[in-house]
Image (tube, grey):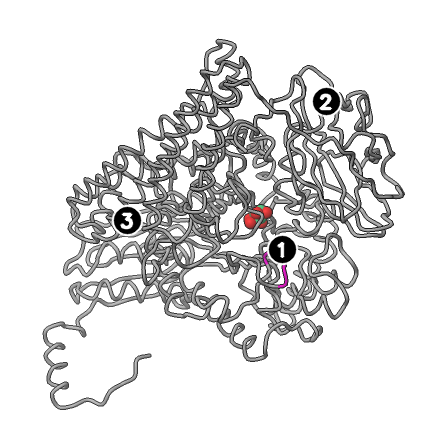
Amino acid sequence: MPPTTPMTKNSFAVSLLLFVALPLAAAPRFVTGADPAPREAYAAEQLRLAAAGLPASTTIVVAHLGDPALAPYAAQLTALTAAAPETFALRRVGSTLVVAGSDASGVLYGALELAKELKGARSLPDTLNVDDHPHLKLRGAAIGMQKPAITYEGAEYDYRYTQEDFPFFYDKAAWTAYLDMLAANRFNALYLWNGHPFSSLLKLPKYPEAQELTNAQLAQNIEIFHWLTAEADKRGIWVIQGFYNIHLSHKFAAAHHLPNHLSKPTPEATAYTRYCISEFIREYPSVGLLMTLGEAMAPRYGAEWMTNAILPGVKDGVSELAAQLGHPVAEPPIIVRRHATDIDAVMAASRPLYSNIDTMFKWNGESLTSTDIRGEVRKEFQELVPISKVTIANVHLLSNLEPFRWGSPEYIQKTVLSFERIGISGLHLYPLRYWEWPVTADKVTPPLAQTDRDWIWYEAWARYAWNPDRDPQAERTYWIGRLTERYGSREAAAHLLDAYQLSGPAAPTMLARLGITEGNRQVLSLGMTIPQLIDPDRFGAIPSLWEGDALDGERLNEYVANELAHKPHHGDTAIGVTVAAEAATAKAAAEAEAALATATRNHEEAARLVTDMQAIHLMSAFYRAKAAAAAEVLLYAHDKKIDHLDKAEVLLAESLESFRKLTALTAVTYRDAAALHAPHRRIPVMAEDSTLHWTGLLPVYEKELATFRKRLAMVRSGAVEDQGNTQKLPQAAFALESGGETFTLTGGAVLGVGAKAPVVADVPVELDGMQGIRVTSADRTLHFKLTAPAQILLALVATGDSDRGLATEAENWNLLYPAAVRLEGKSGRTLSVWSQELPAGPNDLNLGKTNFVVLGFVPAATKLAPHAAPVAAGATPNLDWLFE
Ligand code: ADA
């Protein structure tokens, strides 16, 4: 409340005047429901402000179905039914405006809609006859209570809620503006992500040793979280707190001599987590819970953990709450992610015990790559639909869109239409720069707010989550209207809309056809090296990246194979998408430039849109030339004709020029390329302070071209060197206890059981003769003992999604020897070797559904240098030496 100031004689006179001029007492009469929920009261208040100018004879009725206030209008409201949540109807009946909701949220949306319509109008609308309802049930935005770097005792995702780490969490004015924005866009959920939020939000009296914050900080957090959830509730927004499993309070872990993260349940961790959850439900009954059952916990423990820790915790909380309130309490919905767990087992075990479970799955991984999905990813979504109350598509991380402005309404509309076709009924939307909420990476002081810069990102997703079935022509008019409000002229608005739409598909299509991963291991805008383009598999390419894309097409290797075989190309090819992206983004940049000349408002932001469009264009030009260069290198590998390398040299130089321009531009416009600065970001190079900006990559690409020129000279002179080690690796002792059988890794070795088990054709010298373990147990679990800490060497033997399993679920595996073990068979398929350090003593290895084979163990101290294997006949040739 603003402080009241004593009234002087003069100010009294002024206010009297105002009173006369603005007949406040004569504002419309409001009739609200008998017992309005907080969101109905909030809505009525917004409407009261917007309707203040209407004639005093107006009556405005605001109520939900079943309330006597609506009884006189029953005949006009026959279509409204309580069975359709969040629905509203707006009517004019004589001099009465009726806002009727199927429930409190319906009232909220109806009142906000009418407020928008009236916008201070002085007369009643001639007619008012609106019926509307949402298509997607859950429409949520996410915020990370996480930071660009891992800062808390090396534990991924764990951050304490403190003023130092998350100043925005304590800023009530900023929250209010954000929540108003969400409500205006009809978002009805807000997700907060964190590893272990419980010790930041709860007192946990049973485990005083778990407390991680000062009493004062904890008290402030509890106060602010209650405030936030109540303010959100007023706006129809359900706050949902996310957590990972099994993550413990670090203080609890230390007191109990446990690691901060556990890969399997223990009785202590189960009791502690169960208690945290029950306390959370009791303290914050209206807040939801979103759980990631992996990544720390092995996928196979998901069901056990749900039934022993999570669900009992929820039920304890509900019964304690019921006892406290003296009446039964409904079981709240909980949300389980499909990520890094065996979701079928989890749901099969959980559903008989708890019916209110929603599920969530990543739409295109951690990037935006397509408006629809097919293959395995589609199937995985479809399997969730019948077993979930609500199936939520998680539009996660957007690693390929960072750091530029992105907001193609057309692209988003198509995507939500695909959601509907699949049966997905929830949207979970990440911000474009997740790891550094709430600011953008633009070099602007003070920093820009994401909600402001990326307004169209939020508005478009929300608009189509509410209703994607809208006429494209009408949509164009709508967005031009919105952009006109921002930039002052319709002409500028039309150009800007075209710029957004034209630039939209560039990053999605290029990543799907050229990239390594849809995960945040890769930052598309920083480019890729030639070895990454010609042999993405060696860098851990994830099949779901292109298999999840609904569009048929060819990756670069397939494109080249078809060229060589003189076969026709099909769909979106690696070369085709880059050519299209370069052309479309050139137009996008021209459109944005034209807008700048005609914008009459927000010039500075319009100018930043221009430089973003230019940057996306330069990035596309870089990829166009570089993909073409890579294709020439692959053709050379096949026919050894040097003119391919000559062409590659020209194209590579061209791509470097585009990158140089991109660097010069972004040196002025951006602080960095992507907000994740942790070292598991590896493509194009590992994230370090020096490689976060284009300026750090330019030398990499300059060196690449310089090296290539030197090697090209060698090729021309006929001196070509070979690659590969000749030293055998030392072995570490292990005792296999159960789950598999040992074998010697060498040509002819069988890597699994059964007739279809893969057979080794040849292995690099350093691995030849190692003692490995092939898995024989049905649940694919190995138990073994190590006498000393060792590095385990492992390969994935399944086809299809196997590599994806490792790359997305276990960041602690390192790709050691890409494409090193060649298998027998026509395809000449090669397996990559992955490594990880394991402690001495008993070990337990299980990768869920992923088929693997242990190739051997080497002492922990052995220095393992990742390198590509020598070219084996039939395998994808390794041409790194041309560039490195
Ligand atoms: C990957 C990603 C993480 C996080 C995680 C998840 O491991 O690298 O940043 O997004 O997935 O929870 O889905």
Q: Nearer the viewer, residue 474 or 400?
A: 400
Left-right relation of 196 to 601: right
Looking at the rendered structure, the secondary structure element under dot 2 is: strand
Q: Which mark is residue 244?
A: 1
Q: Position of residue 259 (x, y in %)?
A: 73, 61
Q: Quadrant of the N terminus?
A: bottom left
Q: Nearer the viewer, residue 99 or 6?
A: 6
Disc count in the image? 3
Q: CA distance from mark 3 to mark 1?
A: 37 Å
Q: Which mark is residue 823?
A: 2
Q: What amino acid type is highlighted by mark number 2? A: Leu
Q: Residue at x 48, y 16 (%)?
A: 642
Residue 567 in the image: above or below residue 800: above
Of label 3 and label 2, which has the lower sequence position?
A: 3
Looking at the rendered structure, the secondary structure element under dot 1 is: strand
Looking at the rendered structure, the secondary structure element under dot 3 is: helix
Residue with the mark numbered 3: 608
